[in-house]
Amino acid sequence: MGAIRLEKVKKTFGTLDVIPGVDLEINDGEFVVFVGPSGCGKSTLLRLIAGLEDVTDGKILIDGTDVANEAPAKRGLSMVFQSYALYPHMTVYNNIAFGLKMAGESKEVINEKVQSAAKILNLTDYLERRPGALSGGQRQRVAIGRAIVRNPAAFLFDEPLSNLDAALRVNMRLEITGLHQELKTTMIYVTHDQVEAMTMADKIVVLQAGRVEQVGKPMDLYSKPANKFVAGFIGSPKMNFLGGELAAKHTCHEIGVRPEHLAVSTESGEIAATVKIAEHLGAETYLHVVADEYGPMTVRATGEVPLGEHDKIFLTPEPDRIHRFDAQGLAVAAS
Amino acid sequence: MENKQTPLGYISFSVFAWIVGLLIFFPIFWMVLTSFKSELEAVSIPPSFISFDWTLENYAEVQERSNYFKFAMNSVILAVGSTLVGLVFAVTCAWAMAFNPTKRTKNALLWMLSTKMMPPVGVLVPIYLLFRDWGLLDTRFGLIMVLFLMNLPIMVWMLYTYFKEIPTDILEAARMDGATLPKEIIFVLLPMAVPGIASTMLLNVILAWNEAFWTLNLTTSDAAPLTAFIASYSSPEGLFWAKLSAASTLAVAPILVIGWFSQKQLVRGLTFGAVK
Ligand SMILES: Nc1ncnc2c1ncn2[C@@H]1O[C@H](COP(=O)(O)OP(=O)(O)O)[C@@H](O)[C@H]1O
Ligand SMILES: [Mg+2]
């Protein structure tokens, strides 16, 4: 079991109010991603749950018991660190076995669990090596192995893929998702990368300056962002925000249109613009344009689009894909 | 590493280094040489260099007059004992300062080091009186305490700089893995800090071995180490230079050998972790 509930969790470092007060509900077996810009308090929140930092105030309930004042080991959670944090002086086998040894398991049980974890993670051939003799991806797997053998109530990941190169990152992303499907254990995953959040999460928690901006399923955040921050943070390239005449037409302060929800025409449309840079990716084309009245915008067109610098174009937002925001940046429900 | 120095700069630097090295080495060389001279030759002017009658009589006489091994044994016990006791305190102290620092950690470290700037003579009387009243005079236990306290600031500093280089993440991982604090230190921190601990211990053994102020003032015979052994050969009159040299050579020989074989560790240790 691994249902986690945060009640008014607060954290201050000296006078720095890093987490002003977070309430959050994480269901058993859920894959939850904390996402937000660097320095917004994701790691701090995760470390509070892990017990590596003491809460300033509030409750952390794991399966109904308040563990806010318990030592990390008593909480039954495993953590995978950004730096992997493997024990450099121990073999892979002993790295994975360390937690079991600390728990006083017998040699046979330890061996059995380490071997089966190694099998799941393709580490069987490397058990006698030291971490220094492994590649980045292998080290990552050892860190995950160390986490899974203890059969935790939940896994905590702190940007586990940010030290890997792009190709490996995609692979490991799939592996971790696969692992979750197999183990069905609660996972809390911290990242600043919204693509990881969108692709992996059952539930995304968007954080900014220690505050929860929105909680929801990936597609809900994409299609119904609660405010401008979430709208701009989720989705790539970023949403375009337009004020002026168009916003007035939709009776709001500002409208948001995702680059993929703009129709491109060379003849007519609502927004007149000039192409600055066209990025041709083959399957799609990103057009960085300057709209006459609204300034820089990004357009994502499917397929190959024969446009280049200085070309005059017209853009039209898909009517039912327009997001409306008030002066405070909060989303306004469709009228 | 690429050597960007000009040949001339390189040569003059080497010459300079050799001169400094020889200057530092000369007294030791002269001491060893003198220990093989007769007492008369030892004080002859001009001093004879190589062309004298080499003799072992000083060593024979030193052996006869006092029990070298008893003194040496005391030196070993004091040096190793104070180092081991110091390590227990220094490791825990450096752990706290390196991994749970506060605003005042740096000041505390500087304050600890500043105690090393006080001349020991300043506290000789109070410590002597304490030793007398507690019956610690001329006991190994008492001297181990004094030597360990004397070197504790340096041990803490050295270990602190080494621990600083160890990522906190790894200790936190051990905490998540269920390691209690002692297990975290013994199974994770110490094995990673082996080079640092080795050079800290080495330096401390050498400092304690060579310590001559407290060992001379607080011992008479039972706990007297090699420093007292040397001192017993100096006398206000008569010829004693050759015998003193022989005794000194015997006293520094063990530590010189250890130092020779552990040069690398020592250099690392003495530069306080600045050279990696
Ligand atoms: N031990 C600490 N002492 C003081 N400030 C800290 C400490 N840990 C984190 N912070 C501050 O808290 C804020 C959030 O940090 P963090 O949780 O690491 O952000 P994130 O993981 O989202 O990038 C940052 O401004 C950081 O400087
Ligand atoms: Mg972080």
Image (cartoon, rainbow, N blue to C red):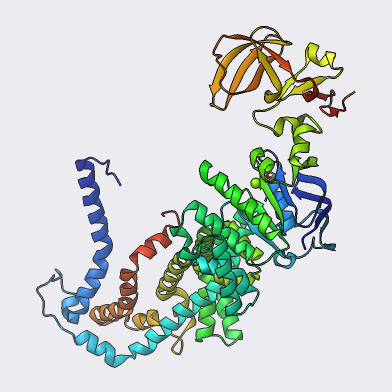
Along the viewing direction, whichever of A63 and B11 lies nearer the viewer:
A63
At horizontal 56% and vertical 19% (from top left) the residue drawn is A278
Q: Residue A330: x, y in percent? A: 84, 29
Q: Residue A230: x, y in percent? A: 75, 34
Left or right relative to A139: residue A68: right
Residue A293: in sight, yes or no?
A: yes
Count of numbered badges drawn on the protein:
0
At horizontal 24% and vertical 65% (from top left) the residue drawn is B26
Residue at the left extreme? B51
Q: Is residue A265 above or below residue A72?
A: above
Residue at the right extreme? A335
Along the viewing direction, whichever of A148 and A24 lies nearer the viewer:
A148
Q: Residue B119: x, y in percent? A: 50, 65
Along the viewing direction, whichever of B86 and B70 lies nearer the viewer:
B86
Residue A55 falls in image quadrant: bottom right
Residue B48 falls in image quadrant: bottom left
Along the viewing direction, whichever of B103 and A267 lies nearer the viewer:
A267
At horizontal 74% and vertical 47% (from top left) the residue drawn is A202
Residue B118: in sight, yes or no?
A: no
Q: Is residue B244 above or below residue A231?
A: below
At horizontal 80% and vertical 23% (from top left) the residue drawn is A320
Left or right relative to A237: residue B199: left
Quadrant of the drawing holding the C terminus of chain B = bottom left
Q: Residue A104: x, y in percent? A: 64, 77
Left or right relative to A60: residue B99: left
